[in-house]
Image (cartoon, coloured by chain):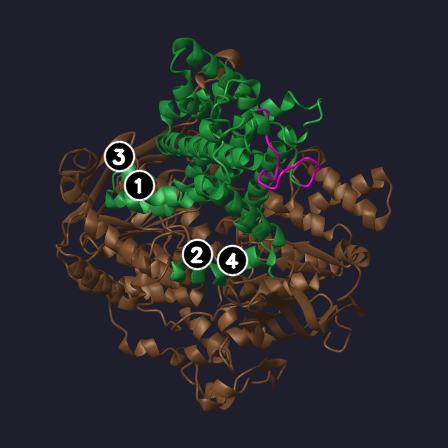
């Protein structure tokens, strides 16, 4: 681990990381969000899902620094008396989990399809790429709404437990296309290189050439895409939850919190919508900036001499 | 000429690249003078700084590179440090530039005429019609047929050689006094190269323009230039009249370089080579940059940098031991000649016994279907189109011999290589390996046993090694795939042995390919090919991406391995000099067919096919400077629409009516098979 860190700080990418404030600030913010979300049961001051601790008389308290606010509820409370800060941390946990899970699944599907299409070619290539075209011809939100709607209609009772899976699938389905296309394009380039020919002459089996020779050489751009995709996935999740087809209000994600807050937008309880919205924005911007920096840092053509 | 004001004068030019870990000095005190109408050649291997000098002169250094000291003067005006707007006036008007790749030097979105006319109008202030007349005249001058029609065509409608003519026309259109040509012929085929060299020489002489010709090819320099400057590690190490530098080089590097070039006019058994390779910019040795590779090096060389010393007769060299080098003639430098060995194959060639063929190719053809997709064909009524990459090729390669396939790009030699190692399947004919049909055996369950026996060495040492793998893993892969080792320790030992046998160290296993130079990478590639103890190696242009001094190392290594292991080579190359040096038998290919085939000695002594003869004549030679020659006319035809009859007849000086209609039969003339109606010497 220490050895790995040392190598990173001495590399060009490491130097570019430390010399770019945008890079390390967005990295720190992302890490803080991920940490806060992952350890929310320990970090958060309250447990917003423990009904025993909720008191309706604490409902709609303003933030601590506003008149009428209480120090125990730093960012105020919502209509059910839940602490906003804790709700945001727990909500971020769900948002990030959906984001990471759907990106992981997208990468898996996309990389395998792209490798097969690019390396083997032929009818498989044609089939996968037309599949991509079909996926791209539907708006992502529409696919997600469709799946969420169908899921709800098929399993009316099981909806709450299935909600997480439905969300992940509905974000993955339009999401893998970009990976499949990128990997296919890079694989086409790589598989014409002589090191692949050398492996073929040695007699290495196709699947081993694909995963051991070609994959390590096409994986770079995928990491960058995936980072930016995490931000997009979190926003898509928020959108779906906001529209009411995401996770249920009993275990709210950031999008659900925003939806709840939306009802109070004009009645003066601004904090119920503003803080979850702010949290979503900070998280998305931080991850996006990190991805942007990675894209530039890993592109040798954009890397300057100093 | 010596006394008049020089067109270009470069004084003590230093170019530096600031890096995170310090400053890299790419050029270190380069001084050059080019007089009016003079052609100065700038020669050196990759990394010597020759292209950098060209870029610095025309003010197009890649950032963050910059001129940190020194001066560049063009016709008495200092042009380094000019503002970009002024520099734009100088470029084009005063200096014309010709680059290596004619494809990227022209803008594909504009017609050739638009690009020429724009440049002419910018610099000469002519009206549109005058500029068009001027452009047509230029195209005629640079030898483009039907210039009035072709001026309105786009660059992609021109072939490679024609495009380079357009680039030359573009460089000359504002009538500059100086032309900087950076590797103008490197991307072209030998037959086209000769035409372009001739053109550049003629046009510049006629217009009195001075030329700075940058190239790695000593032959091109010898045939084109008046004077030559040899660069090494960012410094000029020797300068002088071409004949002087080539025939009596004074710097040990120049001497080694000259000895390392295979000579097409002579039989050589072993090439002299300079050990090691050019140092990287971030690890320049102290003192003389060449000392780690030099036979003369002593303590003075290791500590002090030798100045460029005037030797009289407009020659200068930078070496501490000029007295010693002056005593020696050029082959004496080459220490490796002392253990000159006749390759095993050469000995066998003189013995009468007929060796059994290891590889036999019978009527091999490969046709690629390049038709449009069926839907487009249905809609637009197009026909199926076929590219006949290889047509009815037959040859046999005896055990332990080297068989060479020679030809220009697109002649089908690489398709042959792919078929012979089973990467591609023939449309017709068959390949027999040790009596067995190769392609059906490779498809069978026992294919791995056969695969062990044939391996391949590739052209590009930068693409043939997986950049994400360590060298140890790369060389171990064939051993593991073929289950040739029992334990991890045995694997590591075998990989170490393989690396040692190609002249690398066993401890190099942990390194990654990017930590090696081009020549070392090619050695790794050879080690990998040798891992399964093959009998037959297909070598597809194994040295064309390497520098001359390194090329000699690799060729010598290949000869040693052949002698020690009894290897059989199929050697594919466009370089006739290397083929003559290395091979026992040779086949010349043109548009997918073998036009001439026979023992190397006989073919090089008396080529029978007109194409072979012209190809040999087209190669620039280091001997006989400023030789005039008759280049092959025209260019290789489109293989999708090959000429009728003999495919070479449109370019052949001996062609008659029969050549245009009847495909020539293979005849045997003087022990050589030749497919021609009118072979030489019949």
Callout 2 and callout 4 share a chain: no
Screen quadrant of the N terminus of chain A:
bottom left
Q: Residue at x 66, y 50 (%)?
A: B168
- Residue B624 point in image, percent of width and height: 51, 67
Residue A194: % across, % down: 37, 46
Mark nearest the camera among 1 and 4 is 4
Tell me the CA gap for discs 1 and 3: 32 Å
Asked if residue A70 lies in the magenta stretch, the reply is yes
Q: Secondary structure at mark 1?
A: helix
Q: Is residue A10 visible?
A: yes
Q: Residue at x 35, y 67 (%)?
A: B553
Tell whether position A42 is magenta.
no
Chain corresponding to brown in the figure: B
Mark 2 or 4: in front is 4
Looking at the rendering, the stretch of residues picked out in magenta corresponds to A65-79
User: Disc 2 marks which residue?
Assistant: B545
Of residues A48 and B40, the one drawn nearer to the viewer in this rendering = A48
Disc assigned to residue B363: 3
Whether B382 is drawn above or below A268: the answer is above
Query: Which residue is denoted by mark 4 in the rendering?
Result: A14
Residue count near mark 1 (Cα–Cα under 10 Å), binned few <14, some 14–19, many ≥20: some
Tag 1–tag 3 contact (CB < 8 Å): no
- Given residues A160 and B334, the one toward you in this image is A160
Q: Is B474 positioned to the left or the right of B637 in the image? A: left
Residue under label 1: A209
| Secondary element at image label 3 | strand
């Amino acid at each position: 681990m220490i050895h790995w860190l040392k190598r990173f700080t001495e590399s060009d990418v490491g130097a570019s990381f430390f010399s770019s404030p945008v890079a390390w600030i967005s990295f720190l913010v992302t890490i803080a969000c991920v940490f806060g979300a992952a350890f929310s049961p320990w970090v958060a001051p309250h447990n917003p899902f423990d009904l025993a601790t909720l008191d309706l008389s604490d409902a709609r308290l303003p933030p601590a620094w506003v008149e009428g606010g209480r120090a125990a509820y730093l960012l105020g409370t919502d209509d059910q008396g839940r602490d906003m800060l804790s709700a945001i941390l727990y909500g971020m946990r769900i948002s990030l989990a959906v984001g990471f899970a759907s990106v992981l699944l997208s990468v898996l599907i996309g990389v395998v399809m792209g490798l097969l299409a690019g390396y083997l070619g032929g009818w498989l290539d044609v089939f996968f790429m037309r599949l991509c075209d079909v996926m791209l011809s539907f708006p992502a939100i529409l696919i997600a709404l469709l799946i969420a709607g169908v899921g709800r209609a098929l399993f009316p009772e099981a909806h709450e437990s299935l909600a997480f899976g439905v969300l992940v699938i509905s974000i993955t389905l339009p999401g893998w296309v970009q990976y499949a296309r990128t990997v296919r394009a890079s694989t086409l380039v790589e598989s014409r290189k002589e090191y692949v020919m050398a492996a073929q002459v040695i007699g290495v089996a196709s699947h081993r050439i694909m995963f051991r020779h070609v994959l390590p050489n096409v994986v770079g751009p995928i990491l960058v895409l995936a980072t930016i995709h995490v931000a997009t996935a979190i926003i898509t999740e928020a959108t779906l939850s906001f529209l009411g087809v995401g996770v249920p209000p009993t275990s709210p994600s950031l999008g659900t919190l925003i939806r709840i807050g939306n009802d109070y937008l004009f009645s003066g309880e601004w904090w119920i919508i503003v803080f979850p919205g702010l949290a979503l924005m900070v998280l998305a911007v931080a991850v996006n900036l990190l991805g942007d920096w990675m894209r530039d840092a890993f592109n040798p053509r954009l890397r300057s001499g100093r | 000429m010596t006394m008049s004001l020089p067109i270009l004068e470069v004084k003590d030019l230093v170019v530096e690249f600031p890096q995170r870990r310090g400053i890299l000095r790419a050029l270190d005190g380069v001084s050059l003078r080019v007089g009016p109408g003079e052609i100065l050649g700038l020669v050196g291997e990759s990394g010597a700084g020759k292209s950098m000098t060209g870029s610095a002169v025309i003010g197009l250094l890649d950032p963050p590179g910059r001129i940190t000291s020194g001066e560049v003067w063009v016709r008495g005006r200092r042009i380094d440090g000019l503002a970009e707007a002024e520099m734009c006036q100088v470029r084009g008007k005063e200096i014309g530039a010709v680059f290596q790749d004619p494809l990227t030097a022209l803008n594909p979105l504009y017609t050739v005429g638009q690009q020429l006319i724009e440049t002419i109008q910018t610099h000469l202030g002519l009206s549109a019609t005058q500029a068009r007349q001027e452009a047509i005249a230029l195209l005629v001058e640079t030898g483009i047929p039907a210039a009035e029609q072709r001026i309105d065509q786009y660059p992609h409608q021109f072939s490679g050689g024609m495009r380079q003519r357009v680039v030359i026309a573009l460089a000359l259109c504002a009538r500059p006094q100086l032309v900087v040509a950076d590797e103008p012929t490197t991307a072209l085929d030998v037959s086209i190269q000769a035409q372009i060299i001739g053109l550049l020489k003629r046009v510049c002489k006629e217009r009195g323009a001075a030329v700075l010709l940058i190239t790695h090819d000593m032959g091109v320099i010898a045939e084109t230039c008046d004077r030559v400057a040899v660069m090494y590690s960012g410094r000029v190490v020797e300068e002088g009249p071409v004949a002087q530098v080539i025939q009596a080089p004074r710097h040990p590097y120049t001497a080694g370089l000259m000895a390392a070039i295979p000579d097409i006019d002579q039989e050589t058994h072993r090439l002299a080579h300079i050990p090691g390779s050019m140092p990287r910019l971030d690890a320049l040795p102290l003192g003389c940059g060449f000392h780690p590779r030099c036979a003369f090096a002593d303590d003075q060389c290791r500590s002090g940098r030798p100045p460029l010393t005037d030797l009289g007769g407009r020659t200068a060299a930078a070496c501490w031991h000029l007295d010693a080098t002056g005593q020696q003639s050029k082959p004496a430098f080459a220490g490796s000649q002392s253990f000159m060995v006749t390759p095993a194959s050469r000995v066998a060639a003189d013995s009468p016994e007929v060796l059994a063929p290891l590889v036999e190719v019978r009527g091999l053809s490969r046709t690629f279907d390049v038709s449009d997709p069926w839907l487009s064909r249905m809609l637009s009524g197009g026909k199926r189109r076929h590219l006949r990459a290889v047509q009815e090729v037959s040859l046999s390669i005896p055990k332990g011999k080297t068989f060479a396939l020679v030809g220009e790009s697109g002649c089908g030699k690489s398709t042959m290589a792919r078929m012979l190692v089973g990467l591609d399947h023939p449309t017709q004919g068959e390949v027999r390996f040790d009596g067995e049909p190769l392609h059906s055996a490779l498809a069978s369950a026992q294919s791995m046993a056969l695969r062990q026996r044939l391996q391949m060495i590739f052209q590009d040492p930068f693409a043939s090694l997986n950049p994400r793998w360590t060298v140890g893993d790369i060389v171990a892969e064939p051993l593991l795939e073929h289950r040739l080792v029992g334990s991890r320790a045995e694997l590591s030992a075998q990989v170490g042995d393989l690396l040692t046998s190609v002249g690398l160290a066993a401890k190099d296993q942990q390194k990654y390919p990017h930590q090696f130079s081009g020549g070392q990478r090619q050695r790794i590639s050879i080690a990998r090919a040798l891992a399964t103890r093959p009998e037959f190696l297909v070598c597809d242009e194994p040295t064309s991406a390497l520098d001359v001094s390194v090329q000699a190392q690799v060729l010598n290594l290949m000869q040693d391995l052949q002698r020690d292991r009894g290897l059989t080579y199929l050697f594919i190359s466009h370089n006739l000099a290397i083929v003559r040096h290395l091979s026992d038998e040779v086949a010349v290919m043109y548009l997918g067919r073998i036009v001439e085939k026979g023992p190397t000695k006989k073919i090089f002594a008396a080529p029978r096919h007109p194409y072979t003869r012209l190809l040999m004549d087209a190669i620039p030679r280091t001997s006989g400077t400023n030789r005039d020659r008759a280049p092959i006319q025209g260019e290789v035809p489109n293989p999708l629409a090959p000429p009728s009859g003999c495919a070479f007849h449109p370019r052949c000086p001996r062609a008659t009516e029969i050549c245009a209609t009847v495909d020539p039969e293979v005849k045997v003339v003087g022990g050589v098979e030749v497919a021609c109606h009118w072979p030489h010497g019949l």
